[in-house]
Image (spheres, grey):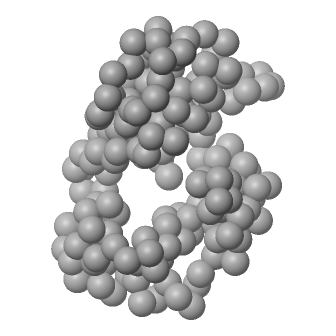
Amino acid sequence: MAEVAGLRWKHVKLARGRLEDLESVQDIRLALIFERCKGGDMMQHELSNWLSVELLKSLGLTYEMNPLYLDPARPLWPATRGRYKGAGLGRRGIAYIVQQRLGTAAVHRLRHTNALALREVGLSLEEIQKLLGHKHLATTAVYLPSLSATRNPKVVEVDKALLGV
């Protein structure tokens, strides 16, 4: 969760397409750069076109400006009210939001839910390994079977919230 909480605008790059202004956003893909993952590795995760556009819209509304001109140090997930307005959400803030929206404060469990959903839609163990950032395939192979028993009961709501399905 610290990796997500620490994301700043400088950790977003254009992976595909052209982005000159928000009015002409069509087929683009942003990538999130995670600098400090487990084991000290860096990871890059490419977002879908839909999620890329939604992230840009959200940042524009949150900061009340075109996100293309944001200071690189601006957090991707800022507090929107209270005395910490504009500061990056911390672990407790993220846990609170997840608890309110999904019924669990166990944020890491969302990673489990995501891994299981990826397997159920047909991704190979190797593809899931890469997305999760596991160094060894054996970690992913052990990880996935145990998830069926701990499946997040709010997975349908997660899918609707994240994918609009």
Spot the residue most to the left: 136
Figure check: 101 above or below 33:
below
Q: Residue at x 53, y 88 (%)?
A: 148
Position in image of residue 9 (x %, y %): 44, 24
Q: Is residue 48 left or right of residue 77?
A: left
Relative depth, front residue between 63 and 156 = 156
Position in image of residue 71 (x %, y %): 46, 11
Figure check: 85 above or below 3:
above
Q: Residue at x 26, y 63 (%)?
A: 130
Relative depth, front residue between 130 and 54 = 54
Q: Locate residue 73: give its quadrant.
A: top left
Figure check: 106 above or below 164:
below
Q: Quadrant of the C terminus?
A: bottom right
The answer, for residue 84, to whether it is visible in the render is no
Position in image of residue 106 (x %, y %): 63, 65
Figure check: 21 above or below 120:
above
The answer, for residue 160, to whether it is visible in the render is yes
Q: Residue at x 30, y 84 (%)?
A: 141
